[in-house]
Amino acid sequence: MSNQSLGIRVLEELSQAVESGLLPDSVQDNAQKLLDRLRQPVRLALMGMPESGKSTLLNLLVGSDVMTDGVQLPTLQLTYGETTQTICTLPDGSRKTLPTTNGAEIAALSPVFVEMQMPLPALAKISVLEVVAPNDVNAIHRASQWASKRSDVALWCTQSFTEDEQRIWSTMPDLIKDHAFCMVTRADALASQGLLDATLGAVSNAARDEFNQILPIATLDALAARQPDGSVNKDKMRESGGLALISAVLKQVELGRQSAVDMADVLLHQHRDILAQDPAVETPEPVAPTLSSSPDASQPASGSATTSDSPLPDGITRLRTLAAKRLQEEEQEGLKPATREAYKHVIQYIEDQAKDLSAALQDLGESAPSEVIAQSVENIQWLCDYLNENGDDTDASLLRARDTAFDAADLVQLMQMEKRDSAALEAVSLILQIKRELQADLAA
């Protein structure tokens, strides 16, 4: 079963389960959050200091020249809509809707917040929030904190990641940091001045532990890679860093959606006896397909991710790659034979353990969540030990996999101590993410 068909099936079943009213109150709330995550696009925020290249990056991400030079707008939310329109929030709190996205007409109203709705294909997967604030550290800090609560993925745009930027970013929630990219914009200009390598090195030293990845991008070159007929010059897009950015964002979209699918699938299995009381609810078979199915690597990333202000954590890695070029070189090398065999063994181990757990859940009753977490702790510790002792130590992919496993071990230990209702689902999701990352490396 492909990820796409599994997601459709889980979405339908979860929707029926929520509407049935049969789930316990504590589970109902969690199920509703998961349902919201699966129904809505992932929320992407563009942050940074003024004039850091956010608007140009927005145009690249959505594939259209939404923002034009010379027009100053406040914080902007770009979402999907069948009809093009702009909803402006005015200083007195009232709203005015315009049947256009013309920047000059919008600016003439002096709005304090703008929501544009457009029928762009990219907006079916992501919504984009461009955060605009005065050139004042405190104002930018407040605006960034506000945006972090309304975002699932963040792009911090910069050219040097100054001390002021470091102070602002250091206070951001860890959850958004796990899904954040530091974008070194205008890389073409830096390269022409012979400053790109030095800038990347300085930014890496200051930010390498604060972001998922650090990516240089020549945004104007990436925009120029789009042809008038709608096609894209892939070589130019790759050279500009645009391809690395788009791939990274799509991976976050897919990881977020698949995490929600995994957790929803486990939730449905845990409560299938209760849900069976309603003939309108289709309950899954005793063994969850999610736990043993392999992702279809040929399918493009699709779907959506979190929408709640406190989404469940699906990020357990902070990739140490500091530039897109270095990442591409590592990927081109491919996996060493010893690492490939180790990955295959780990994937088989996860699938076997998942089958055993799925079968045991039927008899565990109220003790199921604690048993799930206990087994997850044991499984992830085994993964840490096995990956640390096997594979080729010169393989960059293996080093990242080890970091992933150790990060997961820390998280699942914390979940076990916190004893939250949702912890069992989160623990299973962590293991499944490790499995998917290894499968992706094998398929590369």
Image (tube, rainbow, N blue to C red):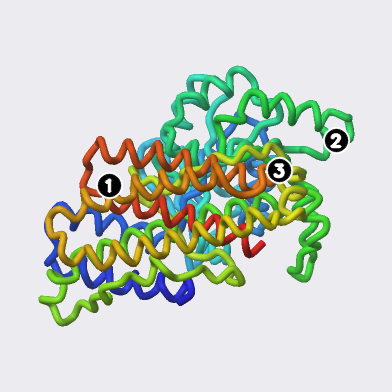
Secondary structure category for the residue under label 2: helix
Q: Which residue was labeled with disc 3?
A: 394
- The one of 117 and 348 positioned closer to us in this rendering: 348
Q: How crowded is mark 1: few (under 14 residues within 10 Å), some or many (20 or more)?
A: some
Quadrant where the N terminus is found in the figure: bottom left
Q: Residue at x 76, y 52 (%)?
A: 222
Give the number of the disc on residue 374. Answer: 1
- Residue mark closest to the camera, 2 vs 1: 1
Residue 398 picture location, percent across and down: 61, 47
Q: Do the residues labelled 2 and 1 touch (CB within 8 Å)?
A: no
Whether residue 352 appears in this view of the structure is yes
Tag 2 residue: 191
Residue reaching furthest to the front = 389
Cα distance between the residues tagged 3 and 2: 30 Å
Which is more toward the observer, 254 or 95? 254
Residue type at tag 2: Ala
Establish if 214 lies above or below 383. Answer: above
- Amino acid type of the residue that numbered disc 3 sits on in the rendered structure: Thr
- N-terminal of the pair, mark 3 or mark 2, is 2
Viewer-side label of 3, 2: 3
Q: Measure how far apart labels 2 and 1 are at the Cα level.
A: 51 Å
Q: x, y (%) of residue 150? A: 41, 43
